[in-house]
Amino acid sequence: MLRLMMGVALLLALVAGLWLGAETWAARRAAALIAEAQEVDAAAVTPLRRLDAFGLRVEAPAVTGAGLALELPHAELSLAPTAPRTLRLTLPGEGRLRTGAGDVALAATAPEASATVAPLRDMAIDAAHLALRDLRLDGRAAAETLQIDARLRRLGHDAPRPARAAYDLALEAAGIAPEALALAGLDAAALPGPLAATGSLRVWLDDAPRLQQGARRPQLAGFETQGLDLATGDLQIRIVGRLGADASGLAEGRLAVFTRDGEAIIRQLVALEIIPAAAALLVRAGLTQLGSTDFPEAAGPLSGPAIPAPAEGELRLPLTFAGGQVSLGAIPLGPAPRLLR
């Protein structure tokens, strides 16, 4: 029995030594990579030294990109023994965002993020999770809740031609202020109020994102949804349909926009400059007829999900993207948005 106990103790000591040594090596390697990187900086990287997780603690990390710089007091990266492919990022509840217009103080409750990677596929991300509550910018409310879950799926024969990866996304967001959307690069100044979004999407990218040094940032190649609910101010809409990038990188496909308030959606489309102000009268005149007619049929991979019939008192507006143009029914609205650059 004594020999057995000594053997077990020796084995535990060996495992602990390997664990501690591996964390030390990982901390040194991470510090070296950060020193070489142009978009990431940190004051120090140290081993986590926790029994329930293998990982690193990064002091004063700073990440720059797209004209912004995010600075945090600290962050922890860890792998649990029960999920060795899932990297968890533990963030503090405060930080600072440096922009061209000045610094913005960030605060949030329970921010958390994780990514599950595939080591045999060049560290491609298999799944990802992001969640936070009560996000504030300089003390002003910016988001009540935000949760995004993504999971890699088979590409499928009906994927847009440029697509190389497909992810199923579940989105739940409430109270997203236009100022927060603007920081994310979205022009939301014309929104009548905070944005709420709930639904699921399949998103196609021209490559899978990878947790790998020097990996390129994937671009959007298309998306489809069987129901994405959006609300801002007095405007509530539900979107069903599919868009993909054509040979020129422009959106092609069809979307159905369901709403009970056609006037509100026209005002918003004019405010967002999707509909020219001069065409608003024409759109208003044909809105009721557009919202009650049959949805145009589409064949092939661009057809996307089945378009349901409108509910009682609901308008169903057909948006068609083809040939570099977008139309509301037979009414041309302007150039189609670009997905791939």
Image: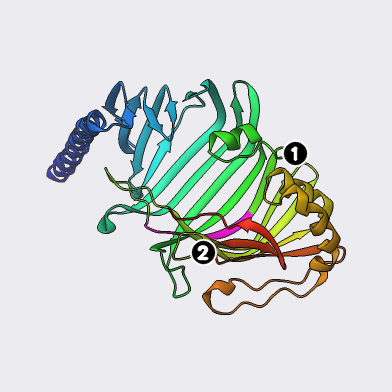
Magenta-highlighted residues: 199-207
Does residue 62 lie above or below 242 as drawn?
Answer: above
**Quarter of the image where one finds residue 120:** bottom left
| Total residue callouts | 2
User: What distance separates the C-alpha of mark 1 from that of mark 2?
Assistant: 29 Å
For the point 45% across and 62% down, the residue is 248
Q: Which residue is mark 1?
A: 192
Q: Residue furthest front?
A: 278
Q: Give residue 3's position: percent from left, percent from top.
A: 12, 43
Q: Position of residue 210 (x, y in %)?
A: 33, 50
Seen at 72% across and 68% down, the residue is 330
Which residue of the protein is positioned furthest toward the left in this rendering?
A: 3
Q: Residue at x 48, y 74 (%)?
A: 158
Circle 1: element type: loop
Overall secondary structure of the magenta section: strand
Amino acid residing under circle 2: Gly
Label 1: how many Cα within 10 Å (few below 14, some 14–19, many 20+): some
Determine which of the numbered discs, if any, sits on residue 244 in the image: 2
| Local SS, label 2 | strand
